Amino acid sequence: MSKKTLTYKEAVSEIEDILQKIENEELDVDDLSTKVKQVSTLIAFCKKKLHETEVEVEKILKDIDSN
């Protein structure tokens, strides 16, 4: 079975869902640490994805300007 690749949109949605649960005090104290770690991992994923996209777009724009 292949593992589905997480998209930026899915990561942001998951972050928003967890933050909403934290704000609404819907998370049990036992789960809070795990969810905060998960959000941290998702934020790191999003930052990396944004950086990679920025580099790619800059390269494309450079290629356009050089033509």
Image (tube, rainbow, N blue to C red):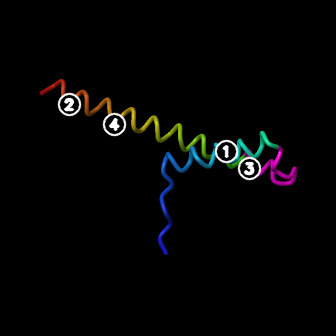
Real-space CA distance between mark 3 and mark 4, rounded to the nearest whole angstrom: 31 Å
> Residue 35 or 24: which is nearer the viewer?
24
Q: Label 2: state its secondary structure.
A: helix
Q: Which callout, 4 or 1, points to the residue nearer the camera?
A: 1
Question: Residue at coordinates 58% horizontally, 41% vertically from top-left?
Answer: 44
The residue singled out by tag 4 in the image is 56
Q: Earlier in the sequence, mark 3 or mark 4?
A: 3
The residue singled out by tag 1 in the image is 39
Real-space CA distance between mark 4 and mark 1, rounded to the nearest whole angstrom: 26 Å
Q: Earlier in the sequence, mark 1 or mark 2?
A: 1
Q: Are marks 4 and 1 in contact (CB under 8 Å)?
A: no
Considering every residue shown, the one lying at the far left of the view is: 67
Real-space CA distance between mark 4 and mark 2, rounded to the nearest whole angstrom: 11 Å
Rate crowding at label 4 as few (under 14), some (14 to 19) or many (20 or more) other CA atoms within 10 Å. few
Question: Residue at coordinates 71% horizontally, 42% vertically from top-left?
Answer: 19
Q: Are marks 3 and 1 in contact (CB under 8 Å)?
A: yes
6 vs 67: above or below: below
The residue singled out by tag 3 in the image is 35
49 falls in the magenta region: no
The residue singled out by tag 2 in the image is 63
Q: Label 1: state its secondary structure.
A: helix
Q: Which residues are magenta?
A: 25-36
Relative image position of residue 37 (x, y in whole percent):
72, 47
Q: Are marks 4 and 2 in contact (CB under 8 Å)?
A: no
Q: Label 4: state its secondary structure.
A: helix
Real-space CA distance between mark 1 and mark 2, rounded to the nearest whole angstrom: 36 Å
